[in-house]
Image (cartoon, rainbow, N blue to C red):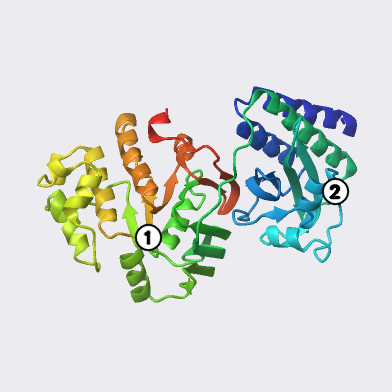
């Protein structure tokens, strides 16, 4: 059996290879954190980075079933703030939440049993803190594991020599949705299938949020709950501080009609209506809709308004479905695999339209399995087995025309 020293050297070598092969600092930090969390047997971890003034630390990337997006720390505020201020590692192998209330709040969805916080510093400046946590049901960290975590942070800092500096943190807008401890079960006879197993997520005004994951991970079920097309088995769902957790079907119908626009993979246009008529049909359902002609102009289809769906390409039909969502003037647009049925060139055209919609201030939540599309997002939530597994705040969102697959 390998000695613990040999295991440590192997882990360090693996992390060094990951960081040296990364093309950007973001990639170096994310992949390095993934490797160390996996090899240290940690349940979660987070990278916190400082703003330009070095006065507040905000999350950039984290692993675990929590949403840290709106959290931040000032100097001396919890373990993160203390470590950044002192530039000394903090090892709390037996975590006491009464001694570090801030960390207990951060990881409320993952009650902390032990924690290691490591300063992350470049050659000339202190950049942030890398934090590792284990839940109360897991074995506590050891000094050997904490040593590896410190080495990982030093190697990640070395990557700064060849990569861009950390950019200003993304600050979320107003919280429009709050989901807490969301579960969803489906019963077929005596068989109960648990699709969502405790999701904690906020959705923010004007953001482009992508839900990513393999088939069956629960992302589409979560989108259906966000859109009021399905109800959670347990947990709370709030929209603008209104609790919809136990809303009736009539209340959910009103919620969808007044607040949510939908873009589907299969377009779902009425085949016997023209593009303009498809939009006017939806416009009649809401108060003060956008002008249907104006909505078609936004998606570049003014010259196709009298065409039926069968007379348009797949990309044109999808752009009509975007216009149909816009005509309601919704606060949030939900898109379920909107480019899955399209070729690359047409997908880029559709994504360009969606990019402009987000720039106009509309919140967009998209489900996709396409990793490349995540480059456009403000945030990416990667789901696994019915839970949030990783969350990334994208500091350099790409344009649709930059995507390649």
Nearest the eye: 111 or 124: 124
Residue at the image position 44 percent from the left and 53 percent from the top: 206
- CB of mark 1 within 8 Å of CB of mark 2? no
Q: Is residue 109 above or below residue 19?
A: below
- Image quadrant occupied by the N terminus: top right
Q: Residue furthest left?
A: 306
Mark-to-mark CA distance, 1 and 2: 43 Å
Which callout, 1 or 2, points at the residue further toward the start of the chain?
2
Q: Is residue 221 left or right of residue 46?
A: left
| Circle 1 residue | 331
* 94 relative position to 281: left or right: right
Between 288 and 51, the one nearer to me in the picture: 51
Residue 310: x and y in percent read: 14, 42
Residue bearing mark 2:
90
Q: Nearer the viewer, residue 273 or 305?
A: 305
Percent position of residue 196, x then y: 54, 58
Where residue 225 sits in the image (x, y, percent)?
Answer: 44, 62
Q: Is residue 233 visible?
A: no
Q: Around disc 1, counting alpha carbons within 10 Å, would you say few (fewer than 14), some (14 to 19), or many (20 or more)?
A: some
Dot 1: element: loop
Q: Determine the residue positioned at 51% across, 44% down.
A: 213
Mark 2: few/some/many CA within 10 Å (<14, 14-19, 20+): some
Residue lying at the far front of the rendered structure: 53
- Residue name at image x 21 percent, y 61 percent: 282
**Label drawn at residue 18:** none
Number of labels in the image equals 2
Q: Quadrant of residue 353?
A: top left
Q: Quadrant of the C terminus?
A: top left
Q: Is residue 219 visible?
A: yes
- Asked which secondary structure carries label 2, the reply is strand
Residue 306 in the image, given as x and y percentages of width and height:
9, 47
């Amino acid at each position: 059996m390998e000695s613990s020293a040999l295991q440590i050297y192997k882990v360090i070598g693996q992390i060094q290879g990951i960081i040296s092969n990364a093309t950007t600092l973001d990639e170096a930090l994310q992949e390095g954190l993934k490797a160390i969390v996996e090899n240290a047997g940690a349940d979660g971890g987070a990278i916190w980075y400082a703003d330009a003034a070095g006065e507040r630390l905000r999350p950039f990337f984290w692993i675990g079933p929590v949403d840290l997006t709106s959290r931040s720390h000032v100097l001396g505020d919890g373990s993160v703030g203390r470590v950044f201020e002192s530039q000394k590692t903090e090892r709390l192998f037996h975590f006491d939440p009464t001694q570090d209330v801030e960390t207990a709040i951060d990881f409320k969805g993952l009650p902390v049993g032990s924690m290691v916080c490591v300063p992350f510093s470049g050659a000339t400046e202190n950049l942030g803190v890398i934090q590792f946590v284990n839940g109360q049901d897991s074995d506590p960290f050891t000094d050997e594991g904490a040593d590896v975590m410190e080495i990982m942070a030093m190697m990640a800092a070395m990557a700064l020599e060849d990569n861009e500096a950390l950019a200003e943190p993304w600050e979320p807008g107003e919280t429009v949705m709050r989901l807490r401890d969301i579960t969803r079960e489906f019963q077929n006879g005596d068989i109960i299938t648990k699709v969502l197993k405790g999701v904690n997520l906020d959705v923010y005004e004007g953001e482009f949020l992508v839900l990513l994951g393999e088939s069956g991970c629960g992302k589409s079920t979560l989108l259906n709950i966000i859109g009021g097309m399905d109800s959670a088995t347990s947990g709370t769902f709030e929209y603008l501080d209104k609790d919809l957790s136990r809303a009736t079907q009539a209340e959910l119908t009103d919620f969808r009609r007044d607040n949510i626009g939908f873009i589907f993979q299969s377009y779902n246009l009425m085949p016997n209506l023209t593009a303009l008529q498809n939009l006017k049909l939806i416009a009649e359902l809401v108060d003060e809709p956008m002008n249907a002609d104006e909505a078609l102009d936004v998606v570049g289809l003014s010259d196709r308004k009298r065409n039926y769906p069968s007379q348009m390409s797949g990309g044109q039909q999808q752009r009509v479905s975007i216009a149909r969502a816009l005509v309601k003037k919704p606060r949030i647009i939900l898109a379920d695999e909107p480019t899955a049925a399209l070729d690359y060139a047409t997908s880029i055209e559709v994504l360009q339209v969606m990019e402009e919609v987000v720039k106009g201030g509309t919140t967009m939540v998209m489900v996709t399995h396409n990793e490349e599309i995540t480059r456009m997002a403000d945030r990416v939530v990667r789901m696994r087995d019915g839970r949030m597994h990783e969350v990334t705040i994208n500091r350099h969102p790409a344009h649709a025309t930059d995507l390649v697959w």
